[in-house]
Image: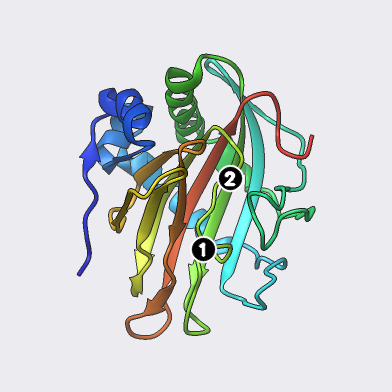
Amino acid sequence: MILAPDFASPRELPDLLRRQGYAVLAPSGVGELTGCSLAALQALRPSWDDLPPDAYLKDGGHYRRRRHSCFVVAGDEVTLAPHRAHWQPVEYNALHGGMQRWFEPMEQTIVQAPAWRQLLRGVAQVCSALKGERPWYVEAHQFRIDTEGGIGRPTPEGAHRDGVDLVAVFLVSREGIKGGETRVFEADGPAGQRFTLTEPWSLLLLDDERVIHESTPIQPLAGAGHRDTLVLTCRAGGFQGG
């Protein structure tokens, strides 16, 4: 049985994030938050069909493809940062922490699209409402998890935090799979929630200081399937790793 999330409205986000550490927006709420039409967001989707394989998976799997780029969002200004490695400390990623992981950058047609910049501004505004206004250092990850090998793991590192201020997980596409349940737990307590994102461009927002999160493995329904997501992490003061 698929459990649907409780969708919030954009105006509820700061209070919900302070109270429970996470919130979920329906695609219509994402449109309201960012000023993007669903058609403009869907126009970004074909980029997920051309993601290079992730060559750094330590579990020996070949189920993940991704691109990675970095941005600085200061008010309405969005700046593409020089391409850099993705790095996390082992305290936050026991499986892949401590590695300089150089992924291919996002395609220029995506990062220059007005809808892309509106997405970044919208997420940064939520972060400023929660943590105080300042420039936000945003790492953007395009992911495709596929089931060509039978099982795909969206979070091979398990339940984790990312070492940032805010995490935004957009479901972009979900085709021919079962599983992929989202689980969110208090970092310092027993409470937890589980649900499955199924609607394209629905959004999970996480206060990374308050909660840990994971997604369960996916399996094919018939033939190969996949789950596409966009993950944005916002951090004050600079990118991880300097």
Q: What percent of the width, then of the height, locates residue 108?
A: 63, 42
Q: What percent of the width, then of the height, locates residue 196?
A: 30, 58
Q: What type is the residue that disc 1 sits on?
A: Arg
Does the image show residue 35? no
Seen in the picture, residue 52 relative to 132 is either above or below; the reply is: below
**What is the crowding at mark 2: few (fewer than 14 residues within 10 Å), some, or many (at least 20)?**
many
Q: Nearer the viewer, residue 78 or 109?
A: 78
Q: What percent of the width, then of the height, locates residue 207?
A: 46, 35
Along the horizontal axis of the image, is 103 left or right of 32? right
Q: What type is the residue that disc 2 sits on?
A: Asp
Question: For numbered disc 1, what is the local secondary structure?
Answer: strand
For the N terminus, the image quarter is bottom left
Seen in the picture, residue 53 relative to 196 is either above or below; the reply is: below
At 36% from the left and 31% from the top, the residue drawn is 17
Q: What percent of the width, then of the height, locates residue 129?
A: 42, 18
For the C terminus, the image quarter is top right
Give the quarter of the image for residue 81. Answer: top right
Q: Nearer the viewer, residue 238 or 32?
A: 238
Disc on res. 144: 1
Disc on res. 162: 2
